[in-house]
Image (cartoon, rainbow, N blue to C red):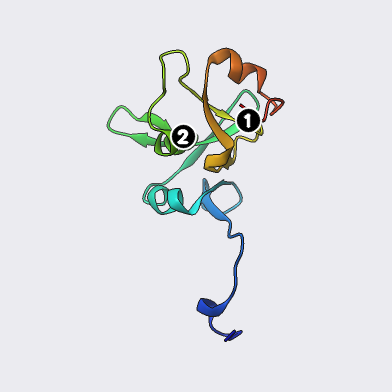
Amino acid sequence: MLDPFDPNTWEIEDREFRIYADDRAQLFAIVDEIDYHYLIQWRWTWIKNRNKIYLRRSVGRTNTSLYLHREVTHRAFGGPPTRYRKISDHLDGNSLNCQRINFRWATKRQNNQNRFGAHANG
């Protein structure tokens, strides 16, 4: 029975899981629930690269950057399949859409051709 005061009884079809990159909750990436619970354990910041915004976190004393989209792609598909297909490509061209269905391992050429989401299949 649906109880409007009990969220456990609410029917929620498509929940949106957000990883925030700032303290004001203005900039975020969308991820799948399976990755959300893993990714929220770190603080994420953002960086602008080629007019796109990416979320990243720093690791170790050298402040090596790990990018959220690469972590999701690695979790979804394992490591890059070849030394040439090693770029985590956003199929729709939206750098803040970090849902698994939006990724593939791609070559540099494939990634450049898909810079604006032109090749959403493959």
CA neighbours of label 2 inside 10 A, class few (<14), some (14 to 19), many (20+): many
CA neighbours of label 1 inside 10 A, class few (<14), some (14 to 19), many (20+): few
Q: Residue 116 in the image: state x and y as whole percent.
A: 70, 26
Tell me which residue sits at (55%, 43%) in the image. 99
Vertical placement of residue 18 versus 5, above or below: above
Q: Secondary structure at mark 1?
A: strand
Residue where numbered disc 2 is placed: 73
**Residue furthest toward the left?**
61
Numbered label attached to residue 25:
none
Q: Residue 10 in the image: state x and y as whole percent.
A: 58, 76
Vertical placement of residue 40 versus 65, above or below: below
Tell me which residue sits at (58%, 86%) in the image. 3
Query: Residue 64's quadrant in the figure?
Result: top left
User: Which residue type does callout 2 highlight?
Assistant: Thr
Vertical placement of residue 121 versus 6, above or below: above
Residue where numbered disc 1 is placed: 52
Q: Secondary structure at mark 2?
A: helix
Q: Quadrant of the N terminus?
A: bottom right
Q: Say whether residue 38 is left or right of residue 2.
A: left
Vertical placement of residue 76 versus 37, above or below: above
Q: Residue 13 in the image: state x and y as whole percent.
A: 61, 64
- Say whether disc 1 or disc 2 marks the residue closer to the N-terminus: 1
Query: Residue 110's quadrant in the figure?
Result: top right
Q: Residue 104 in the image: state x and y as whole percent.
A: 53, 29
Q: Choose between 24 and 44: the one closer to the eye.
A: 44
Spatial CA span between label 1 and label 2: 18 Å
Q: Quadrant of the C terminus?
A: top right
User: Which residue type does callout 1 highlight?
Assistant: Lys
